[in-house]
Amino acid sequence: MMSMSSVLCKAYTHSKTLSENELPRHGGDDHLEAVSIACGVVGGDKILAAKPESMAMLVSHITNNKRYGILRFLEELNGKIPILHVEDF
């Protein structure tokens, strides 16, 4: 059974992806330009008092955590899971 937060996260991610896929089709002659930020995970190597949610997500497949289901959903939806390191910015 999925928690309510997982259901909301999946609904948000799905609607965001659908709307971003439709956006270029509605530009017409106005040459609408848009920037799309892929749903992904950002991690880094900073020492913090608590483990950030993004790091918990990145290691969820190793720790057998329920967050891994969200990563699998992103992979099914986008065909990949974008992962960035904080130094990539």
Image: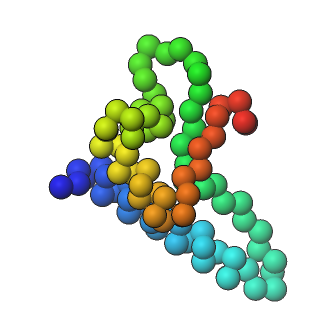
Q: Quadrant of the N terminus?
A: bottom left
Q: Is residue 17 left or right of residue 88?
A: left
Please tell me which residue lies in front, 37 or 34.
Answer: 37
Q: Is residue 88 above or below residue 31?
A: above
Residue 49, by quadrant, is top left
Q: Residue at x 71, y 60 (%)?
A: 35
Q: Position of residue 70 (x, y in %)?
A: 39, 51
Q: Residue 53: in sight, yes or no? A: no
At horizontal 54% and vertical 63% (from top left) the residue drawn is 79
Residue 42 is at least partly visible in this image: yes
Residue 39 location in percent, x, y? 55, 53
**In the image, residue 80 lies at what x, y percent?**
56, 57
Looking at the rendering, which quadrant does residue 78 occupy? bottom right
Residue at image position (57%, 38%) is 42
Q: Is residue 88 left or right of residue 45?
A: right
Q: Residue furthest front?
A: 62
Colouring style:
rainbow
Number of numbered callouts drawn: 0
Which quadrant of the figure contains the C terminus?
top right
Tell which residue pokes out farthest to the left in this image: 1
Residue 28 position within the rendered picture, expressed as x and y whole percent measured from the top left: 76, 85
In the shown orientation, is residue 65 left or right of residue 50?
A: left
Judged from this view, the residue extending furthest toward the bottom is 29
Residue 31 to residue 49: above or below? below
In this rendering, is residue 85 above or below 19? above
